[in-house]
Each structure stands twice: as C-alpha cells, then as structure tokens.
C-alpha cells in the first residue's frame, strides 16, 4: 500500500509544480499549499505505514506493543504543517499587498527590484 | 650560527597595531600633539631593535615561534637576521619621523586620527613582513601591506583619482600577493618546510625539481608587482594621489621595497641560475631606464620623485639579479641610501607644497632666503642621490660600478644602463634641490615659509644620517652592510668600505665622473629635454595605465553579462531551472547506479482507502482545471481534507486534526482575500507553455515517486521510534507519544516553531500596516504638513471613495467586536490549555495565541483603514471559530 501512496505523492508534486510554474501569483500560492501537503505525505510514507493503530500507550500500560504507527515522522509533520500554514498566510498577505501596490499579479510585470532595462554598472572608480 | 630565542620580537609587529587602535582616541584628546605622542611607539621599537645590532653583527640571529595550526605544521614564527634588522630599522626609524610629520602635515583634517591609525597599521604590517619566518605569515603581512596601502592611497576618497589609484594599487599588488601564496604553497609541497630561515640551504635541491621554474616565476611575479617593475610599474606614480607622508613612507622607503626584500630573501633559494639572472637584470634595466626617463618628463615634484623611485627599484632588482657578493653589498648600501634621501626629498616636496601651495617645479623659484632650512636638507639629499662624497650615496654608486667592472659585453651593457639611469636620477635630485630655491622669486598662492619643527625634523635627521653613514662608512659597513649582505648571499660578505686617498685615483672613479658629466649636461638642458619627452609622450595613444582601465572595465562588462544571464529577474525561468534540477537530481542517480525500484504489484487497499485516494486525485485535478477562482479554492480544500483522511486512516489522529483545522483556515482565508482581488479568472498560459510546464511537472512528479519507492525498498531504521515508544510513559509521563516527542524530546524544536509562527504573524501585521509613505497615525507617522500629500496619494487609488467611507464605518464596528471576542477566545483557550496537557492541543493553542494576539494589537489603530480592518476581521473571526471548535 506504500506504493499507492508513493504514486499519490508523485501526483501531488506534479500538480504543485505545474501550479508553481504559472506566472500568476495566486496560482503559485495554490501550488505552495499543495507542495506542503506533498512533502508531508512524502515524509509520512517514507516512515512506513501502519493501519489504524496510533502511537498512543493505553492507560495503565508502560510500553507500547508492536505494531504501532511510527511516531517520529508524525511529530516532524505536525511541526511542518503548522510552519507551512504560517508560511502560506505570510505569502498570501505578501501577494495581496504586492497586488495592491503594483496592481499586478503577473510575475513578469512585478519587476521593481530587477527592472528589465536597469542601468548598466558604471564604468568608473 | 645558533639562533637565540627571544619571544619579544613577536611583539614588534604587534605593537604598532595596538597603537593604531588607540590613535583615534589619542588624536581626539591631544589634537595637534597626537603625532608626537603616537611616535613614541615606533620610536621605542626602533630603540629596541638597536639592542640587537651587536648580536646580529656577530653573525647570529634571533627567532621565536608561537604554535598556530599544528596539524599543518604551521607556526606563527618570526626571526631577525641582518636583512630583517636593516629593514626593520628603516621602517621603524622612518616611520617615527612620518608619524610626527603627519601630525603637523594633516593638522586640522577631520580624519587625521584615522590617518594616523592607517599609518601605524601599515607600519605593523611591514614590520611583520620583514620579520616573518613562516612563509604563510609572510604572505599574510604581505597582503596586509597591500590593504593598508589601499586605505592610505584612497584616504582622500572624495576624489575619483584617489579611488582609482587605490584600486589600481590593490589590484596589482594584491594580485601579486596571490601569486606569492601559490608560490609559497608549491615551495612547501616540494621541500616540506614553511620556515624561511630553514629554506636557505635547500637551494640546490629545489633547483633540480621540474617545478622549479613555476615557483620561480610566481615569486618573481609577486616581487615585481609589489616593487613596481615593468610592466607593472604604472601603479606607483598613480599612488602619489596619497598624502605626501604616505608617498614618503610607503611608496619610496618601505612598501615598494617589499618586493626587493622578497627577492633578496629568496636569493639563496631561488637565485644563482640563468632564469633568475636574466629576468631580473632585463626587467630591472627596462624599469630603471623607463622610470628615469619619465621622471625627466614630469614637472610635478612628487611625480618626478615617484618615477625615480620606479627607477631605483629597477636598479635594486638589477643588483640582486647580478648576485655577486659586491653586487649584493652595493644593493644593501643603495637600499639604505635611497630610503634616506628619497624620504627626505618627498618630505621636502611636502614642505614646499605646504609652504607655497604648489608642487609644480616650473612655478617655483628664488625661495632660498625664505626657506633656508628646507634648502639645506634638500641639498644634502640631492648630494647623496647624485652620489657625491661624503654622502653614503657615493659608496652605493662606487660599489655598483665595481660589481660590473669586468670587460665582458653583457656587463658593459648593464653598466651603460646604470650610468644613464644614475645620471638621469641625478638631474631630478638636482632639479628639486636647486630649481625652487635659486633664480628670481616667483609668486605663489601662499607666501613661502619654512616648515615647523615637526615637518623639518625628519629631513634633518635623515640628512645627518646620510652624511654620517658616509663619513663613518667603515663602522656603517661593519654594522649593517656586512650582516645584511651575508644574509642575502648566504655566505660571509666582508666589508671592504673605507676612506682612503687611493680610491679617488682608481680608474673606476671615472665612471662616477662620467655619470656626473652626463647628468650635468642633462640638467643644463633640463627644460628642453622635458619638452621633447612630453612631445614623445603625447604621440603615444596607449599606455599601461589605459590598459589597466580596459582590463577593469572589461571585467565589469563581463560581470554584467554573466549576471544578466543568470540573474535575469524572470521568476518563471528561475522556477524552471530549479525544477529541472530537481527532476534530474531525483531520477539521474537512480538510473546511473542502476537502483530503480521494481514495478510494484497492485496495492491491496480497502475500499474506503481507495475512496480517499480518489477524493485526493479529484481535488488535485479540479484545482488544475478550475475555471473560476472560487472553484479552485474549494478544490484545494478537497485535496487537503483527503490528506487529513489519509493521516487518520494510517494511525495519525493528531496530524489529521491539525490538517483539518489548517485546511479549513486556508480555504476560508483564501476565499476572503481572493474576492478582494480583481484578477483574471483563468490561468492563461499559451499552449506550448502548458506543454513545457506540464512536462516538467510530470517529470518531477515521477522522479519523486520513483525516489520514494526506492527509499521504501531499503530497510528502515526504527531505533529512535522504538526508544520513544519504550520511554514515553516511564520517563516523560505521557501516553500520546507524538505529543511527548513534540513537547519533551524535541521541545526546543517546537519552541522554534512557535517563534516562526510569531514571526510570520508580526510580519503579516507589518505588511498590512505599511502604506506608501508609512503609517498615517501613531509611531512613525508623518507630521501634519506632510500627511496631506499622503492622503491625496491614497485617494488616487482606483477604488471609489464612497465604498471606502462605508467600509470604514463597518470596519470600526467590527474592530471593536473582534477585539472583545478575541480576548474571550484567548481566555478560553488559556484555561483549556491549563487543563489539558496534551501536546498537540498546546501546540495549536500557542499558535492561535500568538496570531490572535498580533491581530488584537493591530486593531484600534488599523481601524481607520478599510482594507486592513476587513482583513483583521476575517482573521479574528476564523481564530474565534477555531477557539470555539476546540
């Protein structure tokens, strides 16, 4: 069943990358959101899958008995989800403000920092 | 020749650096006396070095080493022999005078403290260079002299000519320094020693190696760039942009001699072979004649002196190239004589410049009565420069002619070069000592006056030294010439200099007479010669200086081209490059190492798992195909929920809950923000772009899928997971292992995560509050008069004013509501978090807290801005929802 998930991860990545290659900022944002999910699923699958047995020690027991889901990737992903969300909201607001200031969401027209016909470096000392 | 160990010599190069550190403060508190006070340090170094004279003259040397990088056998080592001592005495002695002189020369300059610090730093670097034993230490101090020279030449950085000269000097000498580094490393690889003092007996072994010519050329390159030998001579005259004390110190007496020092130091190892002799003599001769001729063309006194310095350096290189014991002795005498008279003449040029306001020799005349002291010191220096007895310059000239007194055609050729060069330099010396002082008085912008004590003391001391070294030449030779020449020659060099009547009757004296006669003739026709040379100069369209500009500008253009290719500013092309790299990096290694995973069987999924998979695929596909934004956003939610369900099905409930929440928030926020954008609804890509992007996406997706499958083939290391599972209850007292990992085992990680969320929240707040022209109320807001303009600016936005007003009112209401609500949520949440210790909850709570706090803080102030308030409202609401949901 890992392989089915691997294929799904590939599909997630392909979708995210296709969206990221768009020139429209909004599409790229959607791509970022999907990319986060893709990476999380990648980590999750790489830590191997176990059905329906969460890594929680039952009350009254000292230790968990096999089989149980691998807790380590879960902990990593939990951190990743939250940080990914923070990043996403930040980028969303950044894109929104850029749209307000520049009146554009096409990356080709958002070139204030690197204008197309920027002056050549001065030939002097 | 057993070395005596003395730790204190390591302090000699360090002391001036300490003084440099103090210089700005000393200058601040003592003002015009700073020069005198700071001169104490170099003066004490000088006096301290005098202690070693007896020891060194007896043929011993002193060394010390501090451990530096033992794994490479590198020591921070210094040693003092005849050669280092002579150089160190010149550096500290002349340096003392220069510091005193600068105290007066730059009086009232606002950066005088900085200038003194630079000078002292340079002095420390130069002392380190000549005292260094380890070759890497030598290289470090070598480059430090280049850097400090850069700072000093560019001291008057407001002028472009200064900046250009500084960069030029740095590029040329710094480039030579790199050659030195490579040479040093190659040398160490061949011989296995880092220490200069240990190298001297390896000459024979080294010169048999095949790589020897490479090492030789590298060292010569370093020496030639530093000592301004043809074809690298052009930087030195330009370096005269520096204030005059710098020219006197760095660019005549010390730094430019570093190349000569290197050649002299390496003479026992690299010398005495054909490449060495021919290269040094040939390039030295060209440099000598070039510099001497061009010196006559100049009328600015500093430029005249600079060109003769180039010539003198050429002369020194010739003498090292000849390499006989007499030639080496001549080199040492000439080195000392030149340092003394050239420094004097530079300082005199500075005094005249200071006293009259011009350095043009054609504009000066008849100042003998007004500047008597200056005239006397200039005359003494010129006598030494021209090689008249009894000054020490006389012996320098005699020795160098003696070294070539063999009747072979090539020595005669070199001899002719020397005579011509000396004659032309004599003319320059005489011109500076005579032209400004004799003849009719010419009007100058400042009334001519002698220098004060601080200015004149140096030239007086140098003059006395030059004369007494000449008069007491026997003792001078024993103390300085013989030990120094022995160190260079690697064999004992006897001192044979002394006064006796017969010396004036030897035929060799005729060569001196010939020099004086040619010089006299040239001086007689000085102005005509200059006119002719100037005409010749103007007929050339190109010189090395222009060549340097071509090189630098070519470099800038090339850098610009390269930057334009890689840094074109088009995001989608950066993205394409990144993802092509990703695709290649994920697939290629698997193909190359032949470790592609086998084709898997049909996966054994349950029907509801299939259902979730189909849901995820449907979500992804509909994001891609969505015709409107809203559909795309909702589809985004579908795939997110599918992911959450996958987590739930495979034993990760915490992940599932978090994912549900985050996806909900994402969709809600996106929907609210996107409806405020007036954008093109469709993703407009041309067909070929769709093919390109789609192909790339598929390649990357397949690559990562295959990579993941390959990873799944390998055994997994579960030690960490088993450790967590075994210890979670006994030592961390938590049953939910994931939560225990987050708050306990990796608690610091979670702390960092919270910091990231907080930083994002603060950044979002800042982004929202930034308007063109900054905030309009509160901290950083413009003053009332300025504010008018800004409001006008904002009203020119394309949104209708009416709408704005309405939303303003709404926003104000909402803001107060949200503030109350968010506070309530916060309380609620904190109570909850106190009750339940479950880690995942605490995590989400802390995040909610930080974000909602940031929002709350922003509220009252942002209320006046419609868009912002709207935004706050949405966020606050979602947060509130979240809190309630919990």
Image: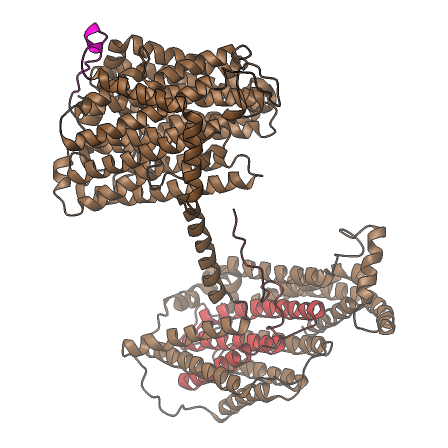
Q: Residue at x 85, y 68 (%)?
A: B808
Residue B399 image position (x, y, % from top left): 23, 19
Q: Residue at x 47, y 39 (%)?
A: B166
In the image shown, does B560 or B750 lie closer to the viewer?
A: B560
Residue B247 image position (x, y, % from top left): 45, 28
Q: Which quadrant: the N terminus of chain B?
A: top left
With B338 as the anchor, is A24 left or right in this view?
A: right
Q: Residue at x 55, y 35 (%)?
A: B156
- In reply to whether residue B479 is colored magenta, the answer given is no
With B222 as the anchor, is B617 left or right in this view?
A: right
- Looking at this view, name the residue that lies furthest to the top: B501
Judged by its main secondary structure, the magenta piece is: loop
Q: Residue at x 73, y 66 (%)?
A: B825
Colour used to depict chain B in the structure image: brown
Residue A88 image position (x, y, % from top left): 60, 70
With B864 as the anchor, is B70 left or right in this view?
A: left
In the image shown, does B195 or A108 lie closer to the viewer?
A: A108
Q: In the rendered view, would you say A121 is above or below B564? A: above
**Observer able to see residue B376:** yes
Which chain does red denote in the image?
Answer: A
**Observer able to see residue B8:** no
- Magenta-highlighted residues: B492-507
In the image shown, does B628 or B568 lie closer to the viewer?
A: B568
Q: Which quadrant: the C terminus of chain B?
A: bottom right
Q: In the rendered view, would you say B553 is above or below B233? A: below
The image quadrant that residue B10 belongs to is top left
Q: In the rendered view, would you say B739 is above or below B474? A: below
In the image shown, does B443 or B212 lie closer to the viewer?
A: B443
């Amino acid at each position: 069943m890992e392989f089915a998930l691997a294929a799904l991860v590939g599909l997630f990545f392909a979708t995210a990358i296709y969206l990221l290659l768009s020139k429209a900022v909004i599409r790229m944002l959607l791509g970022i959101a999907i990319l986060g999910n893709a990476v999380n699923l990648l980590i999750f699958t790489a830590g191997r899958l176990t059905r329906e047995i969460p890594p929680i020690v039952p009350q009254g027991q000292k230790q968990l008995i096999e089989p149980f889901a691998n807790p380590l990737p879960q902990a990593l992903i939990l951190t990743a989800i939250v940080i990914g969300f923070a990043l996403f909201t930040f980028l969303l607001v950044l894109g929104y403000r850029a749209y307000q200031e520049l009146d554009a969401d096409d990356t080709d027209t958002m070139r204030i920092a690197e204008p197309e016909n920027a002056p050549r470096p001065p030939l002097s000392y | 020749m057993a070395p005596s160990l003395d730790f204190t010599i390591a302090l000699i190069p360090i002391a001036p650096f300490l003084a440099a550190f103090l210089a700005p403060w000393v200058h601040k508190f003592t003002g015009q006396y700073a020069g005198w006070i700071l001169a104490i340090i170099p003066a004490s170094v000088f006096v301290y070095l005098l202690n070693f004279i007896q020891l060194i003259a007896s043929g011993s040397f002193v060394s010390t080493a501090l451990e530096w990088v033992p794994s490479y056998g590198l020591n921070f080592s210094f040693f003092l022999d005849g050669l280092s001592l002579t150089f160190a005495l010149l550096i500290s002695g002349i340096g003392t005078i220069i510091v005193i002189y600068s105290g007066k020369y730059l009086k009232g300059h606002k950066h005088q403290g900085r200038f003194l610090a630079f000078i002292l730093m340079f002095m420390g670097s130069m002392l380190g260079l000549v005292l260094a034993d380890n070759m890497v230490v030598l290289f470090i101090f070598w480059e430090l002299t280049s850097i400090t020279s850069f700072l000093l030449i560019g001291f008057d950085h407001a002028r472009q000519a200064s900046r250009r000269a500084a960069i030029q000097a740095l590029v040329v000498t710094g480039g030579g320094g790199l050659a030195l580094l490579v040479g040093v490393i190659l040398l160490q690889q061949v011989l296995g020693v880092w220490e200069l003092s240990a190298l001297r007996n390896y000459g024979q072994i080294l010169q048999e190696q095949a790589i020897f010519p490479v090492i030789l050329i590298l060292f010569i390159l370093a020496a030639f760039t530093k000592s301004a030998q043809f074809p690298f001579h052009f930087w030195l005259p330009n370096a005269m942009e520096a204030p005059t004390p710098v020219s006197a110190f760095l660019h005549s007496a010390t730094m430019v001699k570093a190349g000569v020092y290197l050649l002299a130091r390496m003479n026992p190892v690299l010398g005495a072979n054909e490449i060495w002799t021919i290269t040094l003599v040939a390039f030295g001769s060209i440099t000598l004649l070039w510099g001497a001729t061009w010196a006559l063309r100049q009328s600015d006194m500093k430029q005249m002196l600079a060109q003769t310095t180039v010539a003198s350096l050429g002369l020194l290189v010739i003498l090292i190239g000849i390499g006989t014991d007499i030639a080496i002795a001549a080199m040492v005498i000439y080195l000392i004589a030149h340092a003394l008279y050239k420094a004097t003449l530079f300082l005199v040029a500075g005094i005249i410049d200071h006293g009259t306001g011009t350095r043009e020799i054609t504009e000066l005349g008849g100042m003998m009565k007004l500047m008597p002291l200056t005239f006397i010191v200039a005359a003494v220096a010129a006598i030494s420069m021209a090689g008249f007895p009894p000054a020490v310059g006389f012996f320098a000239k005699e020795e160098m002619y003696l070294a070539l007194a063999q009747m072979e055609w090539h020595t005669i050729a070199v001899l002719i070069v020397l005579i011509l060069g000396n004659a032309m330099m004599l003319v320059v010396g005489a011109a500076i000592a005579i032209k400004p002082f004799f003849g009719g008085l010419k009007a100058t912008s400042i009334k001519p006056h002698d220098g004060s004590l601080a200015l004149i003391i140096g030239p007086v001391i140098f003059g006395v030294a030059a004369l007494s070294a000449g008069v007491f030449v026997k003792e001078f030779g024993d103390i300085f010439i013989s030990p120094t020449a022995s160190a260079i020659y690697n064999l004992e060099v006897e001192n044979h200099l002394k006064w006796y009547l017969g010396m004036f009757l030897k035929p060799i004296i005729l060569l001196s007479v010939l020099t004086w006669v040619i010089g006299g003739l040239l001086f007689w026709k000085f102005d005509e010669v200059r006119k002719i040379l100037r005409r010749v100069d103007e007929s050339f369209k190109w010189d090395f200086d222009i060549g340097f500009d071509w090189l630098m500008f070519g470099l800038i253009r090339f850098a610009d081209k390269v930057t334009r290719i890689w840094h074109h500013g088009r995001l989608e092309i950066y993205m394409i490059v990144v993802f092509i790299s990703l695709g290649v990096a994920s697939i290629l290694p698997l193909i190359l190492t032949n470790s592609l995973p086998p084709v898997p069987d049909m996966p054994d999924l349950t029907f509801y798992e299939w259902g979730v998979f189909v849901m995820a695929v449907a979500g992804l596909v509909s994001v891609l195909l969505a015709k409107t934004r809203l559909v795309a956003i909702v589809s985004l939610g579908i795939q997110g929920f599918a992911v959450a369900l996958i987590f739930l099905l495979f034993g990760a409930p915490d992940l599932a809950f978090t994912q549900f929440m985050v996806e909900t928030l994402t969709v809600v926020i996106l929907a609210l923000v996107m409806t405020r954008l007036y954008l093109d609804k469709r993703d407009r890509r041309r067909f070929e772009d769709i093919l390109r992007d789609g192909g790339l996406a598929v390649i990357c997706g397949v690559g990562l899928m295959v990579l993941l499958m390959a990873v799944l083939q390998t055994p997994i290391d579960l030690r960490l997971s088993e450790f967590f599972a075994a210890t979670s209850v006994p030592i961390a007292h938590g049953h939910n292992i994931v939560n225990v990992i987050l708050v306990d085992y990796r608690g610091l990680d979670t702390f960092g995560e919270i910091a990231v969320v907080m930083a994002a929240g603060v950044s979002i707040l800042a982004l929202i509050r930034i308007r063109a022209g900054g905030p309009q109320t509160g901290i950083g807001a413009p003053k009332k008069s300025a504010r008018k303009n800004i409001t006008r600016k904002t009203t020119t936005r394309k949104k209708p004013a009416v709408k704005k007003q309405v939303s303003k009112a709404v926003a104000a209401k909402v803001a107060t509501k949200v503030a109350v609500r968010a506070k309530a949520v916060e309380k609620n949440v904190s109570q909850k978090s106190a009750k339940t210790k479950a880690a995942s909850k605490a995590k989400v709570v802390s995040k909610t807290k930080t974000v909602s706090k940031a929002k709350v803080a922003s509220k009252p102030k942002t209320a006046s801005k419609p868009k912002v308030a709207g935004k706050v409202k949405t966020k606050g609401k979602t947060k509130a929802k979240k809190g309630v949901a919990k």
